Amino acid sequence: MTRDRLHFLLLNLGHFLDHLFTLIFATVAALALSREWGLGYGDLLAYAAPGFFAFGVFALPAGWLADKWSRDGMMVVFFIGIGIASIVTSFAVTPLQVGIGLFVIGMFAAIYHPVGLAIVVEKWRGTGMRLAVNGVWGNLGVASAALITGYFIDHGGWRMAFVAPALLSIAVGIAYAILMWDEIAAPRPASKAAGASAALSVDMRALLWRISVVVFLTTAISSIIFQSTTFALPKVFAEKLAGLQLSATVIGQLAFVVFALASIGQLIVGHYLDRLGPRTVFMVAAGLQLLFFALMPGLTDWPALLCAMAFMLAAFGQIPINDYMIGRMAQGDMRARIYGVRYVVSFTVLAAALPLIAFIYDHWGFDALFRVLAVAALLIFAVVSQLPARMPVAAVATVAR
């Protein structure tokens, strides 16, 4: 394996681990702690919210540090830091201690997206497919969180679900440091003078602002969809598939299968992004989500499973589109910070979505939640229709500040 391929593999492992760590607690809360600690599912979600808040808020300083110091150095901090935080969280004996541990995990998890994606976009060609492949690894992390945690709940306890991936993450961090040590130790080159925005025409400036508004609005709305589907899916399956009488392990396996197969959506999107442009691809993904979210209420057992497969395929498929648009527009020496802003919006909404999920679930159940998600998909479809047919390639840092 060449050095470049190994580097890309380690970055992909980082995306896998990032999403795995942030969703371990989703399955733990749904299938273990509600029994062990005698708390309701909605009550437990409150302790996960600070972790997702940190996941969002710390993305911007992580991107700033990466641009000022070293992107590869920040990746080493991510791997080792999140591993240690996860091990410490495994020792929690109260909900408050779990909440604190999840907050620290969220701080380190915030590093990956602004830093790892900036490296992927800047270092390799074929941005659409590279982001799609990287996104698939992230989706497999989402899927594996339910699979691994469900397994450990039935075979040894939920604490090992925090420890096992932590040991892997620390090992990968050490390998990353060895592989990229020359780049980490090298002085950061001076940033280019920021004068590109002054040379843009009024029409181009207006177009870039319109695209930026679309990016950040759809980021916020799609984050509600992502959080509601990925975090709640184990609990959705526990209720919707109750007639199948499944164990925690099997529920975790089914969630893994759904998430893993849904990752194909990102490869399809990555294939067409460079060919059709983000507007067409985004509208198709939003339209499919609208359709299957609207169909989900009232379904149970196998029909519910198949419908979940369909809306996850569309929801996962749209994930790399905003990152693709930012990669096309942003200056290289500002890209990590701009990704940081994007993920501050994204993961702050993820944190806010948890109380929303808990409130809707406690008052009306999951059928009402899927109706809300259908409306969200409709809003995304309407907003994305305002994108231009062809994306400009403009190095403008100020647009996304």
Image: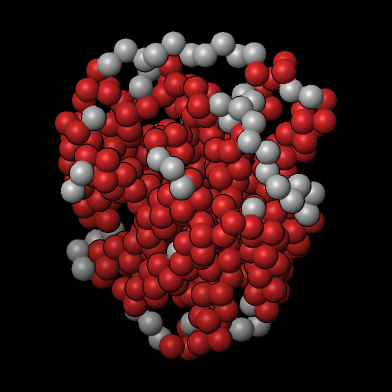
Which residue corresponds to the image point at 25% horizontal and 64% vertical from the top-left? Answer: 152
Q: Is residue 167 above or below residue 195?
A: below
The one nearer the camera, 3 or 80, is 3
The one nearer the camera, 242 or 363, is 242
The one nearer the camera, 273 or 111, is 273
Q: Position of residue 273 (x, y in %)?
A: 58, 55
Q: Is residue 128 left or right of residue 282?
A: left
Q: Is residue 82 above or below residue 158?
A: above
Q: How many marks?
A: 0
Q: Position of residue 180 (x, y in %)?
A: 23, 30
Q: Is residue 197 left or right of residue 309?
A: right
Which residue corresponds to the image point at 28% horizontal and 31% vertical from the top-left? Answer: 76
Identify the image quadrant of residue 11. Answer: top left
Q: Position of residue 244 (x, y in %)?
A: 43, 88
Q: Is residue 331 left or right of residue 371?
A: left
The one nearer the camera, 286 or 246, is 286
Q: Position of residue 184 (x, y in %)?
A: 27, 22
On the question of residue 73 being in view, the answer is: yes
On the question of residue 36 being in view, the answer is: no
Which residue corresponds to the image point at 64% horizontal and 13% vertical from the top-left? Answer: 195
Which residue corresponds to the image point at 51% horizontal and 50% vertical from the top-left? Answer: 128
Where is the C terminus found, in terms of image quarters? top right
Q: Is residue 334 above or below residue 107?
A: above
Colour setting: secondary structure
